[in-house]
Image (spheres, rainbow, N blue to C red):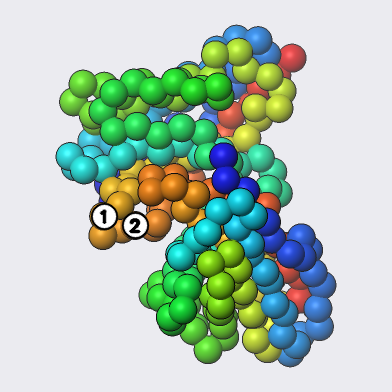
Amino acid sequence: DAKTTQPPSMDCAEGRAANLPCNHSTISGNEYVYWYRQIHSQGPQYIIHGLKNNETNEMASLIITEDRKSSTLILPHATLRDTAVYYCIVTDAGGTSYGKLTFGQGTILTVHP
Amino acid sequence: GAVVSQHPSRVICKSGTSVKIECRSLDFQATTMFWYRQFPKQSLMLMATSNEGSKATYEQGVEKDKFLINHASLTLSTLTVTSAHPEDSSFYICSAHGDAETQYFGPGTRLLVL
């Protein structure tokens, strides 16, 4: 699986958009970009994933650059409950690494009032 | 999204005893489930892949005789920590694919070995 690089921490004001970057310059053509988050003492929560097109769901938007070497997770209106560790993971969902999610250190997002 | 449950949510045991943790997929069937471990202030580490009806596949460095995995049905996988020691104290998390592309995680089980 391609390695990802994320900033260790970020701050965001409540109500503002939180933009979390992720670099995955060695991503291969069949690898997806996944985002999960982990609130303290809980299991990771799936947020969104994509292959090459931008994606949006009720939680967030995922913007993937045209060369697919980086992506940005956007939480449009951050709340205090969005404070968590956010993990960007690249994997070939149905390929040889099926199910093997490699978690890095992630980004600690702190949303403040 | 798909729901994965774990039981118990936390357990305290004495050193040398065995502890069983259950992982259930509540609204879907899972032929494959995964077990992760997370130590304080660290990220999740995959321990093993649990396969329904067959032996589990363990990651390098994980002792298969210490961490027994049984996947007897399409909705249940169990992890038994045998002869637990204080260094086994950790947060154990399971997951399963709710669909072909997305993996969903349980709430985790916190194990404390005294």
Residue B41 seen in the current view = no
Q: Is residue A32 above or below residue A69?
A: below
- Residue A52 at x, y percent in the picture: 26, 28
Asked if marks 1 and 2 touch (Cβ < 8 Å), the reply is: yes
- Residue B102 at x, y percent in the picture: 44, 45
Q: Which residue is mark 2?
A: A98
Image point (47%, 53%), residue name: B97
Instruction: Check disc 2 and report its element: helix, strand or loop.
Output: loop
- Residue A104 at x, y percent in the picture: 44, 48
Image point (62%, 17%), residue name: A78
Residue A63 seen in the current view = yes
Answer few, some or many: residues within 10 Å of disc 1's Cα (few below 14, many 20 plus, some between 14 and 19): few
Q: Which residue is mark 1?
A: A95
Image point (82%, 72%), residue name: B12
- Residue A89 at x, y percent in the picture: 39, 43
- The reply, left or right, for residue A19 in relation to residue B42 is left
- Residue sitting nearer the eye, B31 or B20: B31
Looking at the rendered structure, which numbered label has been put on residue A25?
A: none
